[in-house]
Amino acid sequence: MVDTELADLSNNMLLGAVLLYVVAMLGYAADLAFSPRPAKARAKALVGAGAPVEASAEDAGGNGEEKAPRRDWGKFAVLLTLFGWLLHAGGVATRGMSVSRWPWGNMYEFVVAICLAAVTAYLVVLVRDKARYLGAFVMLAVVLGLGAATIWLYQAPGELVPALKSYWIAIHVSAAIVASGGFTVGFVTALLYLAAARHEEKGGTGFLDRLPKAEVLDGVSHKSIMFVFPVWTFAIISGAIWADEAWGRYWGWDPKETWSFIVFAIYAGYLHARATAGWKGRKAAVVSIVGYAALLFNLVGVNIFIQGLHSYAGV
């Protein structure tokens, strides 16, 4: 039995979350566009224009003139992100309550939950690493994910198929959702690293000056992946245990199992190369991006285009 009132509330809360995320994304973009550039970036711009480096102090506002306080678009965006996260979490919770089950029984619900995990991971990185500069890019990824889920993957609330009626859905699938959200933040940061590193090599000025140094972005991406990799490993192990209970074998190289292992192998290679061979920077970023591409294929390609034992989740 579906509680239609709760189901409608869930849809409305998720719509509200998307709208708040869009405005937050614009706020983060405004924060990057209008925030003062770091002193070194200002000096580089002045030297490139033929001005003496000493002028950077005046450029920073040290000419004795009182200036109007700058609007802090970043704080505004963070506040909207928090409100959006609350609506998002409420939408996921009420979706589950409307059918009295865990709210990730199909592709639509799974993607919505991954987007929630990505926002949660961003908020953790925001507090831990003061990484507000990631906000516009993470929000863009989340809005695109929620939009794709709503337009192409939406399913009305309903009962779980018999194969998913197990307590393991709360363990195995939850771990996969958390790990996917963390990998999303690592992927976004790796892309920003490549852009920032190329910008620094060329000695250019502009928008990318407002990002931290490339090595900082590399470190944030590494920490994000390192934190959630054990969670992905646990998801694979718990999935194997569930498979033994459901199908009488731990591993059968089903397409979903195979691609989950491929994702594991790529990220394991990434972490191993950093720890032993000292891989940092561009090589590491490329490997992490390949790992995320494999994760997306495992999520979309395997579920939609390849038939297997895991095809029951629906699209």
Image: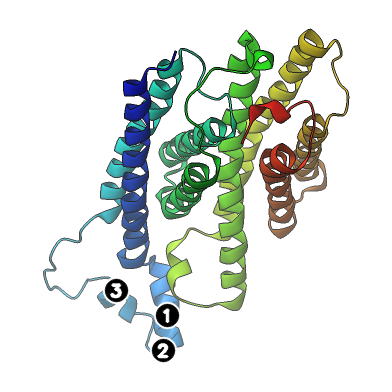
Q: Which mark is residue 45?
A: 1
Q: Earlier in the sequence, mark 3 or mark 1?
A: 1
Q: CA distance from mark 2 to mark 1?
A: 6 Å
Q: Residue at x 52, y 78 (%)?
A: 204
Q: Please name the amino acid that badge 1 sits on.
A: Ala
Q: Residue at x 58, y 65 (%)?
A: 195
Choose mark 3 or mark 1, whichever is in front. 1
* Number of numbered markers: 3
Q: CA distance from mark 3 to mark 1?
A: 13 Å
Q: Quadrant of residue 7?
A: top left
Taking 291 as reference, is 66 above or below it? below
Instruction: Give coordinates of residue 120: x percent, y percent.
Output: 46, 34
Left or right of 67 in this view: 295 = right
Tell which of 130 and 112 is nearer to you.
112
Taking 170 as reference, is 42 above or below it? below
Q: Earlier in the sequence, mark 2 or mark 3?
A: 2
The answer to whether marks 2 and 1 mark residues whose Cβ atoms lie closer than 8 Å is yes
Q: Secondary structure at mark 2?
A: loop
Q: Secondary structure at mark 1?
A: helix
Left or right of 96 in this view: 186 = right
Q: Secondary structure at mark 3?
A: helix
Q: Please name the amino acid that badge 2 sits on.
A: Ala
Q: CA distance from mark 2 to mark 3?
A: 16 Å
Tell which of 197 and 230 is nearer to you.
230
Left or right of 12 in this view: 310 = right
Q: Quadrant of residue 66?
A: bottom left
The residue that label 2 is drawn on is 49
Q: Quadrant of residue 50?
A: bottom left
Q: Please name the amino acid that badge 3 sits on.
A: Ala
The answer to whether marks 3 and 1 mark residues whose Cβ atoms lie closer than 8 Å is no
